[in-house]
Amino acid sequence: MSELNIYGKQPKAKYKSYKGEIGKICKNLLLKKVVDKNKNITYFNRDFQTSNINQIWSTDVSEFHIASGKVYLSPIIDANSREIISYTISRSPNFKQTIDMLKIAFKKHKNLNGLILHSDQGWQYQMKEYRDILKEKNILQSMSRKGNCYDNCIIEIFFGTMKNEMFYGHEYEFKSLDELENAMHKYIKYYNENRIITKLRGMTPKQYRCHSLNNLK
């Protein structure tokens, strides 16, 4: 194959923020206990059901890798409207990126009492400063079970959608990290304002948020 200048595509390792228990691990508040008396078993279902916006938010970090380097996207998504509430992009996965993401979200949304903010068990979300900020806002912290990406599937679905639509197959079109970051900014704006989502009754995330807000009046 090398004689024909054909090379197999090497899969890139997925970024993992879990570094062990370096802080506090929280319970998964999105698990619903189910008792099947007929089969005499007990199990847990993931419950992402919401009746309106700002009830469940989900967050995580995803890596975008091109020839000139890597960038990391840290967004918050609303489980109800699927809107990206806030996000930050960084050249390295650092704690400031996570805190800045929270600051942007809290600047936009003031009354978040009782909101559940769900994440995996990444090191960022175990930090005391992160937990204290949520506590100050009366936000309930929730974490996925260790090694269970399905517990955080709402944000994982977004990452998959974004990468399939603007990144996979286009990696070599980005000549620099600046170009990639600009494309990411444009995509998230498109996703929030223009991308139709079937589960949202054929609306965009931004339209559905407005629809939900009108229902609160």
Image (tube, grey):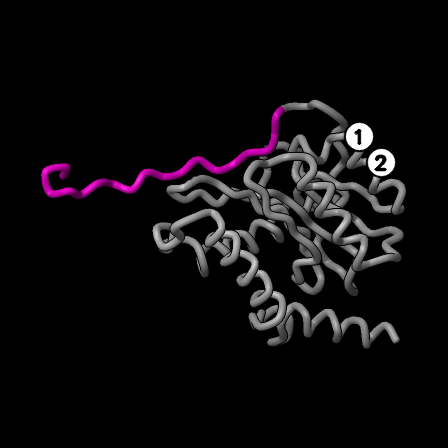
Q: Is residue 21 left or right of residue 212?
A: left
* Amino acid type for the residue under numbered disc 2: Asp
Look at the image and tell me in which quarter the C terminus lies. bottom right
Q: Which range of residues does the magenta coloring cover?
A: 1-19
> Element under label 1?
helix
Q: Is residue 62 left or right of residue 166?
A: right
Q: Is residue 42 left or right of residue 213?
A: left
User: Residue pushed farthest left?
Assistant: 3
Look at the image and tell me in which quarter the N terminus lies. top left
Q: Where, by quadrant of the figure, is residue 133 drawn?
A: top right
Give percent across and percent down for residue 120: 65, 38
* Amino acid type for the residue under numbered disc 1: Lys
Give percent across and percent down for residue 203: 63, 75
Majority SS type along the magenta span: loop
Do residues under tags 1 and 2 come within 8 Å of each other at their CB atoms? yes
**Image point 45% across, 61% down: which residue?**
165
Q: CA distance from mark 1 to mark 2?
A: 6 Å
Does residue 168 show up?
A: yes
In the picture, the disc for residue 132 is 2
Give percent across and percent down for residue 96: 69, 38
Image height of 166 relative to 7, above or below: below
In the picture, the disc for residue 128 is 1
Q: Count the labels in the image.
A: 2
Sort mark 2 into few (<14), some (14-19) or many (20+) by Cα contacts within 10 Å. few
